[in-house]
Image: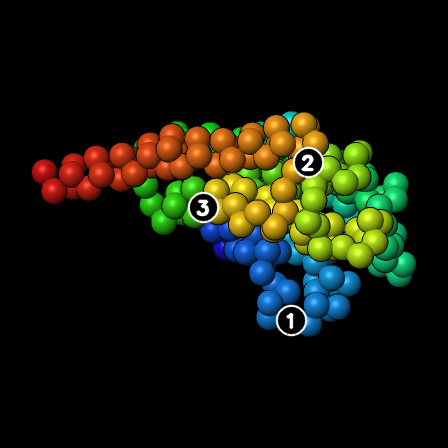
């Protein structure tokens, strides 16, 4: 198989590859030792996610160059942290946060565009639909984390003994982001500043808009396509 054929095959399955990388990032720590996951596997999985995200926008040359820059910055930052994993956010961690925030903003928008424009609903489109929803949750996490870093104590109930415990903040805010996105709202973590409260409202609205609009459009296309096949 030549390079062009391989690329076309990968591009046809771009949503499946991106979804798989997201799932391993989200739930990889459930099947491997936590220390190994955080030290070795987590950086690798995020780099793989960047690569699969680049595949999603590979038809846009300008964005490919931008994503290549993000990948290079991430690779360098993970290399700097490999031998000395910090207990609190430093310059490298802030750079990485910006990189991922930008990455998921662009990828989420691109996923929504491609799913919206799809003429037929295939398994790959369904994977794209799910990937978009998970990406919104990650955007919510980066938003909440940014607020907490700028104004510590914006969220009450974070499972940390030390306010500088970066790893615990990350885990708690990822959990809180998806609980908010899913509108479950257990209430053990809640925003206590005006900015954090507005951010929580925004994430909840984004999740509802996605389900009501984007998912509804995909379902309508699937029903119409199924009826056309029967006709």
User: 159 and 55: which one is in front?
Assistant: 159
x and y, in percent, of residue 127 in the image:
43, 48
Per the model, the C-alpha gap separating discs 3 and 1 is 24 Å
141 vs 78, left or right, is left
Report the side of 164 relative to 195 (left or right).
right
102 or 62, nearer to the observer? 102
Which residue corresponds to the image point at 55% horizontal and 39% vertical from the top-left? Answer: 136
Q: Is residue 34 visible?
A: yes
Give the image location of residue 51, x and y in percent.
63, 47
Q: In which quarter of the view is residue 39 placed?
A: bottom right
**Spot occupied by residue 180 in the image (x, y as percentages of width and height):** 54, 42
Q: Disc 2 marks which residue?
A: 192
Q: Residue at x 43, y 42 (%)?
A: 129
The residue at which mark 3 appears reads as 130
Instruction: State the residue position of label 1.
Output: 32
Mark 2 or 3, nearer chain start = 3
Where's residue 176, x and y in %?
61, 47
SS of the residue at dot 1?
loop
């Amino acid at each position: 198989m030549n390079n062009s054929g391989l690329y076309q095959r990968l591009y046809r399955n771009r949503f499946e590859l991106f979804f798989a990388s997201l799932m391993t990032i989200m739930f990889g720590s459930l099947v491997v030792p936590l220390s190994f996951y955080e030290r070795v596997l987590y950086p690798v999985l995020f780099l793989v996610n960047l690569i699969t995200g680049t595949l999603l926008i590979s038809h846009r040359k300008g964005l490919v160059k931008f994503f290549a820059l993000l990948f290079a910055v991430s690779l360098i930052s993970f290399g700097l942290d490999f031998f000395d994993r910090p207990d609190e956010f430093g310059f490298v961690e802030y750079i990485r946060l910006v990189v991922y925030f930008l990455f998921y903003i662009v990828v989420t928008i691109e996923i929504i565009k491609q799913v919206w424009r799809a003429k037929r609903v295939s398994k790959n489109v369904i994977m794209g639909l799910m990937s978009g929803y998970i990406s919104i949750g990650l955007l919510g996490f980066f938003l909440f984390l940014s607020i907490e870093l700028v104004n510590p104590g914006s969220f009450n109930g974070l499972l940390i003994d030390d306010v500088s415990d970066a790893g615990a903040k990350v885990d708690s805010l990822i959990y809180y982001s998806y609980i908010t996105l899913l509108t479950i709202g257990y209430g053990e973590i809640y925003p206590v500043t005006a900015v954090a409260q507005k951010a929580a409202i925004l994430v909840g609205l984004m999740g509802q808009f996605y389900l009501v609009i984007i998912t509804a459009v995909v379902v309508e296309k699937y029903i119409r396509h199924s009826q056309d096949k029967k006709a």
